[in-house]
Amino acid sequence: MIILAATPIGNLGDASARLIEVLENASVVAAEDTRTTQKLLRALGIDNRPRLIALHDHNEKTKAAELVALAADDDIVVVSDAGMPAVSDPGYGLVAAAVDAGVTVTAIPGPSAVLMALAISGMPTDRFAFEGFLPRKPGERRSALERLVAEPRTMVFFESPARLAAALADMGAAFGAERRIAVCRELTKLYEEVRRGTAAELAAWAGEGVKGEIVIVVEGASAVDVSPDDALTQVQGLVADGMRLKDACAEVAAATGLRSRDLYQQALAARSR
């Protein structure tokens, strides 16, 4: 089988007993960075020296078939540099190939920067959307954020320290001055820090220079109090501008709290009048 194994995101004390047992007995480990995995094995006091196969963004398409074939006769342990493989890390392509080939896939749960940041952010946790890394180019980043303006769920992003201030400034421009944001830095590590405030406040802080691994948690948009007739007018306006009816209903539903299905049926009924 394929075993996705979550590794510590900082503090080695978070390594589970199951993780250590599996690594102690593994014969093949697919690793995002084999050097990092070798250091992890030594740091955890694991004497086993499994065969290490590099599995990263640049070779996953070609390596997936090889690993799936190996999994027919042996367990393949998959690790990323930190956290759960396949979540904003290599592994998705391998899992998809394994599923297609009928190979069993399981996971050893463990540390997650996404869930930890969400839990300690002070934002609603009942519904959330993980958006991964924002685009590097400013124009593409701003466009991505503009598409999320009406997203009602709490949003979680990864970002590099070098782009943090610019990303926060763009969030302020897209989401408005009052939207709550939490920047979580160096989670589980010695200098763990959570900064909470508006985008402008946090951008000013980040502009002074920030180091470490960064997770940004952003409050979702508040539902707008709008009548069904007004919502239908918004849907019709979006469709007139070229948007598909289904997409227009979904966008207005997200912004207003109304049901997308109800808006869709209302729009169809209005067309037939």
Image (spheres, grey):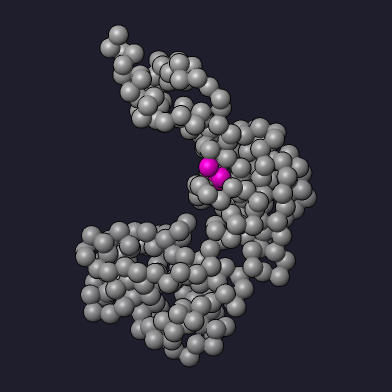
Position above or below: 47 against 36: below
Residue 16 within the magenta-colored segment of the rendering: no
- Residue found at x 31% / y 78%: 75
Taking the view exactly as shown, the residue that stands out farthest to the bottom is 47
Residue 11 is left or right of residue 62, and the answer is right
- Residue found at x 39% / y 19%: 239
Q: Which residues are magenta?
A: 153-157
- Residue found at x 46% / y 74%: 34
Residue 133 is left or right of residue 192, and the answer is left
Residue 156 within the magenta-colored segment of the rendering: yes
Q: Nearer the viewer, residue 268 or 139?
A: 268
The quadrant of the image that shows the C terminus is top left
From the top left corner, tell me how far across and down residue 145 is, in percent. 55, 37
The quadrant of the image that shows the N terminus is bottom left
Occupied quadrant, residue 236: top left
Q: Nearer the viewer, residue 206 or 103?
A: 103
The answer to whether residue 240 is seen in the rendering is yes
Predominant secondary structure, magenta span:
strand
- Residue found at x 73% / y 45%: 197
Residue 1 is left or right of residue 207, and the answer is left
From the top left corner, tell me how far across and down residue 129 is, in percent. 50, 47
From the top left corner, tell me how far across and down residue 254 is, in percent. 48, 33
Position above or below: 122 against 169: below
Position above or below: 202 against 63: above
Occupied quadrant, residue 270: top left
From the top left corner, tell me how far across and down residue 167 is, in percent. 63, 43
Q: Nearer the viewer, residue 105 or 96?
A: 105
Residue 8 is left or right of residue 205, and the answer is left
Q: How many marks?
A: 0
